[in-house]
């Protein structure tokens, strides 16, 4: 079993839809949770970052962490064609290590 | 800053040949990471360095893979001999911190490797 599970999709939605992307994990030591966005033939770039449990909002994007369920989500409101990309969740524990564990990534297509 | 620089962007080689991938991290960043991305396995960490010292190489698939960081501005990932199953996109990333606290990892554009 992988430490981080993410449905690879693809997920196709019409422009303006609300998108929900999710990851589950098994390691209760994870404290830092991130979402990276990767456009086709590009490197991933950090989109959202959350420490421990709770919600974080940034414009049209909201990240949620539920540590009791070992479940994290990324919501995109009013989705745009420019949001079409692969979204990867990533996480790490505390302690002196820089190692991130990535999910498989979910490919999202927003159709005009 | 120009961001993380990787070369070459594309590499096509034949099985058994040596392949060297290069990375220049963002100036001032203390951590450097090498990742491999495939459709089947996603994004996998191969090795990472802190202040030019390898910290964790548990993701290096086998002895055919080696990585070095001779100075703060340059790192190489070498595959010798290469095999078709090594075909993937290899990313280099760097971060300012990365130890006890999390920090943003900045990824390069990747090297797309095809081994025939």
Image (cartoon, coloured by chain):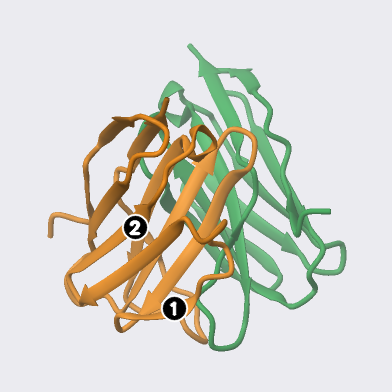
Chain colours: A green, B orange
- Occupied quadrant, residue B110: top left
Q: Position of residue A4 (x, y in %)?
A: 73, 55
Closer to us: B73 or A75? B73
Which residue is found at the position 30% from the left and 80% from the top?
B52
Q: Position of residue B88 (x, y in %)?
A: 46, 37
Chain letter of the residue carrying label 1 = B
Which residue is found at the position 20% from the left and 76% from the top?
B72
Q: Which mark is residue B89?
A: none
Which residue is found at the position 40% from the left and 27% from the top?
A82
Closer to us: A62 or A38? A38
The answer to whether dots 1 and 2 both sit on one chain is yes
Is residue B4 left or right of A40 when viewed as pictured?
A: left
Q: Measured along the vertical axis of the image, is residue A45 above or below residue B45? A: above
| SS at mark 2 in the image | strand
Q: Measured along the vertical axis of the image, is residue B77 above or below residue A12? A: below
| SS at mark 1 in the image | loop
Q: Say which of marks 1 and 2 sits in front.
A: 2
Residue B109 visible, this angle: yes
Is residue A88 left or right of B50 when viewed as pictured?
A: right
Q: Position of residue B21 (x, y in %)?
A: 28, 50
Q: Which mark is residue B98?
A: 1
Residue A15 visible, this angle: no
Is residue B26 left or right of B56 when viewed as pictured?
A: left
Whole-angstrom CA distance, mark 1 to mark 2, is: 20 Å
- Occupied quadrant, residue A10: top right
Check if mark 1's residue and mark 2's residue have beta carbons within 8 Å.
Answer: no
Q: Which mark is residue B77?
A: 2
Q: Position of residue B18 (x, y in %)?
A: 32, 46
């Amino acid at each position: 079993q992988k430490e981080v599970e993410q449905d690879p999709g693809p997920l196709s939605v019409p422009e303006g839809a609300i998108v929900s992307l999710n990851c589950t994990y098994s390691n209760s030591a994870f404290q830092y949770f991130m979402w990276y966005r990767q456009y086709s033939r590009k490197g991933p770039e950090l989109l959202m970052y959350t420490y421990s449990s709770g919600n974080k909002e940034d414009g049209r994007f909201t990240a949620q962490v539920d540590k009791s369920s070992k479940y994290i989500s990324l919501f995109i409101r009013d989705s745009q064609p420019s949001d079409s990309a692969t979204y990867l969740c990533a996480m790490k524990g505390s302690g002196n290590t820089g190692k991130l564990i990535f999910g498989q990534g979910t490919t999202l297509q927003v159709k005009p | 800053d120009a961001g993380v620089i990787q070369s070459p962007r594309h590499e096509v080689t034949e099985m058994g040949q040596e392949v060297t991938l290069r990375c220049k991290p963002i100036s001032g960043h203390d951590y450097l990471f090498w990742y491999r991305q495939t459709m089947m396995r996603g994004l996998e960490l191969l090795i990472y360095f802190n202040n030019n010292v390898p910290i964790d190489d548990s993701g290096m698939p086998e002895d055919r893979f080696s990585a070095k960081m001779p100075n703060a501005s340059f790192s190489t990932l070498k595959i010798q001999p290469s095999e078709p199953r090594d075909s993937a996109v290899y990313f280099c990333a760097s971060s300012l911190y990365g130890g006890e606290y999390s920090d943003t990892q900045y990824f390069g554009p990747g090297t797309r490797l095809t081994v025939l």
